[in-house]
Amino acid sequence: MAINWFKYASPATFYFLAGRMIPFFTVVAVLLLLVGLYISFFVAPTDFQQGEAYRIIFIHVPAAWMSMFLYLVMAFWAGIGLAFNTRLSSMVASAIAPTGAMFTFLALWTGAWWGKPMWGAWWVWDARLTSELILLFLYIGFMSLQAAIDDPRRADKAGAIIALVGVVNIPIIYFSVQWWNTLHQGASVSLVQSPKMATAMLTGMLIMALAAWMYSIAMILIRTRSIILERESRAAWVSELKEGVTRS
Amino acid sequence: MILWIIKRDLLLAMRRRADVLTTLFFFIIVVSLFPLGVGPEMNTLRIMAPGIVWVAALLASMLALGRMFSGDYTDGTLEQMLLSPVSLSALVMGKAIAHWLITGVPLVLIAPVLGIQYDLPAESLMVLTLSLLMGTPVLSLIGAIGAALTLGLRGGGVLVSLLVLPLYVPVLIFGAGAVEASAAGLGFEAHFSLLGAFLLVSVVCSPWATAASLRISMG
């Protein structure tokens, strides 16, 4: 028995599938978040060098991971949408962008809070910080381009091009910034300290990362559903949906 | 075909010389503003010069991007170009080269004079000019993608800066870095190799991406 995957490429089918999946991912995200926060605040030991302030990494590291990963996922779906002309893929790509930008901002913000007690500065022109900042600019560029175009199909395709150009550029930007920094000054500060992390710390971080993952999926599904409703508002099945709501 | 479009765009630019000069004077004014803001100490200015000249070049090249396609778009020429049987990528390549000849080359030529204002030594002046010579075509090529994507949009000018400036970062780093490295006696060959690599990658990829963007924008 083969599953017809293409069935789920239709916004109408996906809308209901996503509706069934959202509660699951939300519950898992909340549970993982609670467990992760408990481990990060009560189980994980105090770091002998950095004291209590290191606990920021339980938010910071997952946020930084998600920010980079989500950009790739976004570009992937945008590319699929461009190549196969599937509307749903492009909708998912547009739904990912705000979550990705939020995580990028969160990573920068928590990084600043971590940097103040550790390095004595809110901001350092370190390679990773700078490339994360540029990643935020790429997200913002993607979103503002899509927002500026009224025709949704043109917005999808234009966004896909800029997302793909961004993906080609991310490694270039990352290495440029890294070399720029090392050329400027022999790395005065480095994020790569990690003197063999305690198991509890690592577990906490991984659970928090999973929670961030589940949260992203739930958020993206919710946002995709809104985009579907917005774009398909003239479709028959949406008006049936509306009637159903008023009748019940 | 490429030659034809270059010739045509250059001819159009020569008929409206003021546009070319505006970009050039913008570049000169931005570079001249920095000493007024930072103060006239030559030692500080000498260190900042490569970065300032490069940032100004980035902005000047970006401001001129709007003109790359918009004229042809409004009078319908671009539509005819899309319909013509010749490769759109080649056409776009020609337009990017013309854009570079009109906006990039004047910047390269005036840069040594501006460098003298900042009291750069002769070798740094040479490296600065060469780095601009290699870097500005990359700016035109990458910028073409942004210009094509924002064609006919409201607020396209501001939007194009959001799209294009983050992508300019590597060029800025190695363009300005080459001058600093040579001033520090480290040698600038590595920076030039990387700038050359950026140029090759953008020559290969950008016309193709720009052509796809134009097709999307013209719907």
Image (spheres, coloured by chain):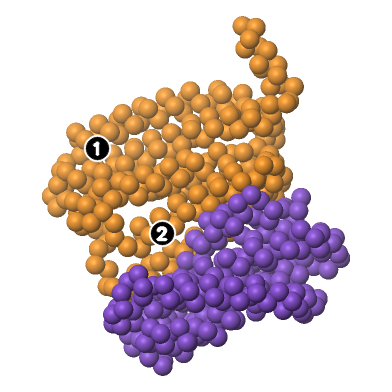
Q: Is mark 2 on a helix, strand or loop?
A: helix
Residue visible at 49% across and 83% down? B111
Q: Which is nearer the eye, A169 or B26?
A: B26
According to the image, label 1 marks what residue?
A40
Left or right of A187: which side holds B109? Answer: right
Taking the view exactly as shown, the residue that stands out farthest to the top is A248
Who's orange, chain-wise? A
User: Quarter-wise, where is residue B203 in the image?
Assistant: bottom right
Give, as a three-letter code, the residue at label 1: Ser
**Which chain does the residue under circle 1 lie in?**
A
Colour assigned to chain B in the rendering is purple
Rendered position, B192 above or below B37: below
Q: Position of residue B93 (x, y in %)?
A: 70, 72
Rendered position, A152 above or below B94: above
Q: Which is nearer the eye, A178 or B114?
A: B114
Across the whole image, how many numbered discs are drawn on residues?
2
Left or right of A64: which side holds B78? Answer: right
Quadrant placement of the N terminus of chain A? top right
Give, as a three-letter code, the residue at label 2: Ser
Residue visible at 62% across and 12% down? A245
Packing grade of label 2 (10 A; few <14, some 14-19, many >=20) is many
Residue A131 numbered mark, or none: 2
Residue A17 numbered mark, or none: none
Mark 1 and mark 2 in contact (Cβ < 8 Å)? no
Quadrant placement of the C terminus of chain A? top right
Residue B214 visible to the viewer: yes
> Which comes before the other along the chain, label 2 or label 1?
1
Q: Where is residue A211 in the image (x, y as percent from the top left)?
A: 38, 35
